[in-house]
Image (tube, helix red, strand yellow):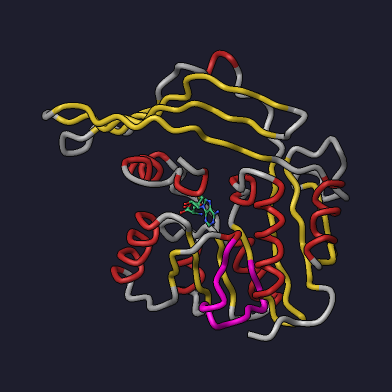
Amino acid sequence: MEAAEFYTGIVVDAYAKLKSSTFDPGPYLEFVTAHGQPALEIGCGDGQPLLDLCAAGLDVDGVDSSLDMVERCRANAAERGITTGIFHQRAESLSLSLDRRYASIYFAGPTFNLLAEDETALRALRAIRDHLTDDGTALIPLWVPGPTPEDELGVTRSTDEESGVELRYTPLSETYDQEHRTRITVTRYERVTANGTEVASRDWMIHWHTPDSMRRMCAEAGLDVIGLVDDDTSRDASHESESFTATVRRTGPALAL
Ligand SMILES: C[S@@+](CC[C@H](N)C(=O)[O-])C[C@H]1O[C@@H](n2cnc3c(N)ncnc32)[C@H](O)[C@@H]1O
């Protein structure tokens, strides 16, 4: 299964139930308010924070590579009376059929690290460039994960049993490859009901970037890095940063849409 298909099937149910319900839309609201509309959220999942920004009156579209997530996001939008573009597309092959260019493009959290190889990440950066307005800005949060602690492997997190359904997530084992900047965690998701247990095994791949490799890739994609900031210290990101955010703008002439 490809990395972009990770969030499908029971993983979508488990993700919705196990994720923090206190996701703060604030930074993305501020970003779009500062840099302009329309905006595009890449990897919008089931709609957090996309739908909060729409509810606040901002013109924001969403894309996600998982059809299950897109359908859930559309249902969540309809429930909240929100009408906006929610597209089933991959970041690395954003189609020009979106037919719009965006003043702001952002990932809400380090979804960029789900792009499994440098080549895929570079394609995503090029697609972002092509979909920014000439003076548009993109926000790309990045994460440099450490290995999952040994004592967390094999430990199950589960949802409270609701109406006879329990969802479970267990990280089982991991390969941590510093040279290729990848961490692959073998995971197991389970849905336990009175009728039996449905099991899905997934490899959760994180592919990380250093400040230097990110700068190089952005330059190759035709993007200027106007900020590369450590999320913990608010200083320039360094090789010690575990979490940092790139702010980029397009260089060169616009692609005609
Ligand atoms: C960690 S989730 C975040 C979702 C959202 N912020 C939320 O909490 O509802 C990452 C999302 O990125 C999507 N994704 C993964 N790879 C992608 C790709 N190549 N292009 C677009 N979306 C992708 C997944 O399907 C998933 O919905």
The residue sitting at 21% across, 35% down in the picture is 165
Q: As rendered, which of 120 and 12 lies closer to the eye? A: 120
The residue sitting at 70% across, 40% down in the picture is 208
Is residue 157 within the magenta segment?
A: no
Q: Is residue 252 above or below residue 177?
A: below
Residue 117 picture location, percent across and down: 66, 44
Q: Is residue 232 above or below residue 147?
A: below
Magenta residue span = 93-105
Left or right position of 26 against 210: left
Left or right position of 73 against 244: left
Q: Residue lying farthest left?
A: 195
The residue sitting at 70% across, 26% down in the picture is 177
Is residue 103 within the magenta segment?
A: yes
Residue 1 picture location, percent across and down: 45, 40
Q: As rendered, which of 59 and 30 lies closer to the eye? A: 59
User: Which quarter of the figure has residue 190?
Assistant: top left
Residue 122 picture location, percent across and down: 72, 56
Q: Is residue 102 above or below residue 26?
A: below
Left or right position of 101 against 6: right
Which quarter of the rendered picture does the C terminus lie within?
A: bottom right
Residue 90 picture location, percent across and down: 53, 60
Q: Residue lying farthest top?
A: 151
